[in-house]
Amino acid sequence: MKKIVVLGSINIDTILNIARLPLPGETMAMHDRAIAGGGKGANQAIAAVRAGAETSFISKIGQDHAADFMLDTFKEDNLDIDHVTMDEKAGTGKAYILLDDKGQNSILIYGGANQTITVDDIHNAEATIKGADCVISEFETPIPATVEMFKIAKANNVVTILNPAPAKTNIPEELMRLTDIIAPNETEAEAITGVKVVDEDSMELAASKMHALGIKTVLITVGSKGSFYSIESDKSGFVNAFKVNAVDTTAAGDTFIGYLAANLEHDLSNLESAMIIASKASSLTVQTQGAQNSIPYKKQLNL
């Protein structure tokens, strides 16, 4: 069983179902409203544990009913939450998701307690990080905490995976050098490299620019098309997505990363086959509305 540590956000998602995204200044009626658990970090941690990995989560919550809801969800999945702590001032993170009839979404984030995670929180989890096979982080929590976790991981031969989302153009060089695998979508890849990702040639170019920043393995996910990979000075390729009717793309990328980490060998020798499994899991996620409730369990993949 793989041991995974995820550093990241916890959000309560409010999902607003609408026919299409509104134009500037436009007032629209919505079909429905729903509440669900979310946050990129929490989604990735739940994906990893449902994929069969022993998973520990580093995060923060507020003193509110949202926190109780999220902790109950984590306990149901046997996620290790010893390092999920409470901030006395900030509220639990929140996300407001506009979901259109085509399954596409736009998301607004209130960081709340997610933004109070510190380097000290990472030091408190140091033994757990040292004992992991792989660590994962993203950008809904402070970057200094991610840098510190990746430093500890690299010093102990633990694989580091960075999900550079939400998109940033000013990622610290130190963090890039500490990253073994970076997994942006096409928007995030363009923000990092300046290359507009539209085909495999542009994916190769974007990957080469990320390799130049010190990252050996680059994965670029391109939604319903699939995912591209490039291993520096070795090989590259493309894994086609499973064709399904998407209802809601929320958490698809997080599912991909959690399942990838749970199935990846330490030397990355099975990268392509792990990507296929991750793609299958994501194809199930997009067929159900919501974030964490849509993330499948390993047995549902039928692989």
Image (cartoon, rainbow, N blue to C red):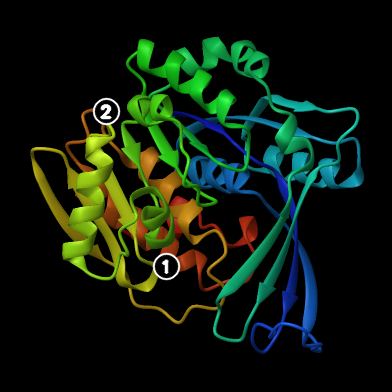
Quarter of the figure that contains the N terminus? top left
Taking depth in this image into account, of 262 and 110 the one nearest to the observer is 110
Q: Is 290 positioned to the left or the right of 62 in the image?
A: left
| Residue 81: image location, x then y, percent | 67, 28
Decide: is 121 above or below 205: above
Residue 231 seen in the figure = yes
| Residue 147: image location, x then y, percent | 49, 23
Residue 1 seen in the figure = no
| Label 2: element kind | loop
Q: Is 151 positioned to the left or the right of 42 in the image?
A: left
Q: Name the quadrant containing residue 215.
A: top left
Q: Which one is earlier in the sequence, the residue at label 1 or at label 2?
A: 2
Residue 162 bears which disc, if any?
none
Q: Name the quadrant containing residue 90.
A: top right
Type of amino acid under label 1: Ser
| Residue 163: image location, x then y, percent | 45, 44
Taking depth in this image into account, of 88 and 275 the one nearest to the observer is 88
Residue 283 bears which disc, if any?
1
Mark 1 is surrounded, within 10 Å at the Cα level, by few (under 14), some (14 to 19) or many (20 or more) other residues, namely many
Q: Determine the residue positioned at 74% across, 29% down.
A: 116
State the separation of the CA atoms marked 1 and 2.
25 Å
Decide: is 275 above or below 286: above
Type of amino acid under label 2: His
The residue to which callout 2 is attached is 266
| Residue 112: image location, x then y, percent | 79, 41
| Label 1: element kind | helix
Quarter of the figure that contains the C terminus? bottom left
Taking depth in this image into account, of 301 and 212 the one nearest to the observer is 212
Q: Determine the residue positioned at 37% across, 24% down.
A: 178
